[in-house]
Amino acid sequence: MSHSSGVRQAQKQRTRQAFLDAALELLEEQSLSSLGLREVTRAVGVAPTAFYRHFPSIADLGVALVEEALGGLHPMISGTVSEAGDSGERVERAVALIARHVRAYPAHVRFVARERNGGVQAVRAAIAEQMDRFTEEVRAELSRQPESAGWSDDDLLMLAGLYVDQMLMTASTFLEARPEEWEGVGRVAERRMRLISIGRHHWLG
Amino acid sequence: MSHSSGVRQAQKQRTRQAFLDAALELLEEQSLSSLGLREVTRAVGVAPTAFYRHFPSIADLGVALVEEALGGLHPMISGTVSEAGDSGERVERAVALIARHVRAYPAHVRFVARERNGGVQAVRAAIAEQMDRFTEEVRAELSRQPESAGWSDDDLLMLAGLYVDQMLMTASTFLEARPEEWEGVGRVAERRMRLISIGRHHWLG
DNA sequence: TGTACATCAGTGAACGCGCGTTCACTGATGTAC
DNA sequence: TGTACATCAGTGAACGCGCGTTCACTGATGTAC
């Protein structure tokens, strides 16, 4: 068996994932800075000391959760911007995509929205870094579009940041809405995005 | 001496304020959900049990902090919208006002940004209620402007929400910026707001 | 103004409890030959 | 294939500590007359 496979490695990965899953569930109702190490190990069903075999501290587990929550979204985010169609269609698809993502991964979205301004510095930094990458990727996509002729990189970055912040805010609004409110939340989110797109088309001249 | 004045009442108010001040300072580096009752009383310099003379729990202290942080801002927020001048001037004044406010009350701003999505339900609800009031007040101001002719109340509320969210986000960005970055942050915030205003002027037709 | 009683903000001891971290350990898995 | 040794994920006891909450208290302030 090679170094990186084997029964032992596989089991370790499974336990590590159990820590991430348990923590994420506990974080639905509290912030990371109040999450206890013993609380997590209890939820997983292992001894408290087992935690240290996987993470040096709860803050490090938090950073791993950021990667899990946001690391895989980069293609999805910039893909949304580069889609075919007029800007109205793109807006509708973006909002639908956000709604679907929130439904599929509510705990991940909640975690990111909560800890983006939360009390754990390392986690805040990890989220900020991911958000900056999203913004840069969206800027790169925008710059490829004909509508961006005449725009400076600076202005494109400003617009990209506006879109990215709007996406997270929309996700967070869905999260707090009751099921019967989702449709209305989606419509408002679409109109916000559409108004921004109109601003974009009249930005110059 | 009347019921509500007197040495005793005044002293009680002073102690209560000392709790709020001490908590706010401790909250610069952690979230409310991990703030300890003993931690606060220690910072104030009173016995742990004194806390209960003022608040039933840390969550209630948090709700009081929301009132302190946001309760007095209503005239300022809607005043910004109703100011004279063209929309470019209004944007500049709004961003300057936000910058000044963040400089004067950084801990209050941090607290609101952090706990808006934080782990304490009662505090999240209190912040949401204040934000909804801001949005409604901004909507009312917008509806008085000639630029709003032909707008539905629904669309005005959408626009007001966009402005209010943008204000809090701008405040939070100032908060995290190093001093030498403030000017740049301000310029980006102005351009975001200006783009939204352009979208507003071309929304109909 | 003076006196007798009521109120109540803040005290300090005590409680049981769960916390994070240390340490030496066990036993299944992995490796060398 | 078999054997002897190494690795290391997870254990369980133990530690000192700070937590939130209770309770009966004290003594300055307030009130009635």
Image (tube, coloured by chain):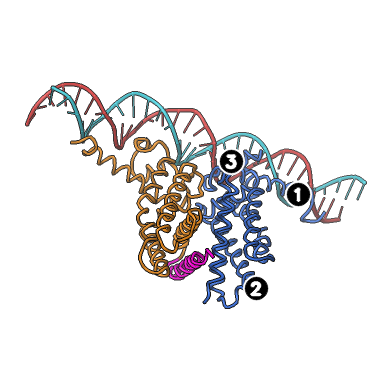
Chain colours: A blue, B orange, C red, D cyan
- Quarter where residue B78 is shown: bottom left
Question: Where is mark 3, residue-wise?
Answer: A38
Question: Considering only order in the chain, which callout, 2 or 1, is on the residue closer to the N terminus?
Answer: 1
| Residue A201: percent from left, percent from top | 56, 70
Q: Chain of mark 3?
A: A
- For the residue carrying disc 3, how many other residues have a C-alpha within 10 Å: few (<14), some (14-19), or many (20+)? some
- The tag on residue A10 is 1
Residue A62, horizontal then vertical, whole percent: 59, 51
Query: Which chain letter goes with mark 2?
Result: A
Image side of residue A79 versus residue B68, left or right? right
Residue bearing mark 2: A144
Determine whether A20 is above or below A150 in the image: above
Q: Residue at 68%, 65% (x, y): give it.
A: A85
Q: Is residue B168 magenta?
A: no
Q: Tell me which residue sits at (40%, 42%) in the image.
A: B61
Residue toward you, B33 or A137: A137
